[in-house]
Amino acid sequence: MTKRKTSSKRPERRYVVHGVRREMPDLRKLSKALLAVVLAEQQRTADAVEPEEGVRG
């Protein structure tokens, strides 16, 4: 049997990455959305804790 070559017959591929310029994100919209998520999470947590405290007292 003959030995197999480890290198392929094709030349090595080269990849090029180009950056894309985009507009800056609207920080006011992002901050309002983040606050809405945080407040909703806090409200959900408070609603989950509140019924337990009512049963005890």
Image (tube, rainbow, N blue to C red):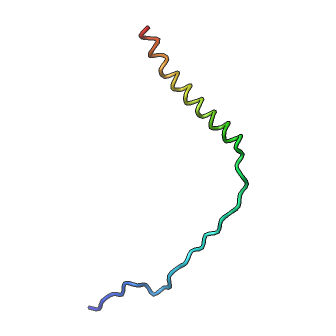
Q: Is residue 33 above or below residue 6?
A: above
- Could you tell me which residue is drawn at 65 percent across and 65 percent down? 19
Relative depth, front residue between 48 and 19: 19
Tally of numbered discs: 0
Kindly give the residue lying farthest to the top in the view shown.
57
Q: In screen coordinates, is 24 left or right of 14? A: right
Assign the C terminus to one quadrant of the image.
Answer: top left
> Is 37 placed above or below 20 here?
above
Using residue 37 as the reference point, say whether residue 21 is left or right of it.
Answer: right
* Quarter of the image that includes the N terminus: bottom left
**Residue 11: x percent and y percent?**
50, 85
Q: Quadrant of residue 18?
A: bottom right
Looking at the image, residue 56 lies above or below residue 32: above
The residue under the point 44% across, 16% down is 52
Q: Residue at x 48, y 85 (%)?
A: 10
Please name the residue shown 67% across and 42% down the image: 30
Q: Name the outermost residue toward the bottom.
A: 2
- 52 w.r.t. 25: above or below: above
* Left or right relative to 3: residue 10: right
Q: Quadrant of residue 42?
A: top right
Residue 28 position, x and y percent, is 71, 40
Residue 20 % position (x, y) = 68, 63
Residue 25, how many percent across, how many down?
Answer: 70, 49
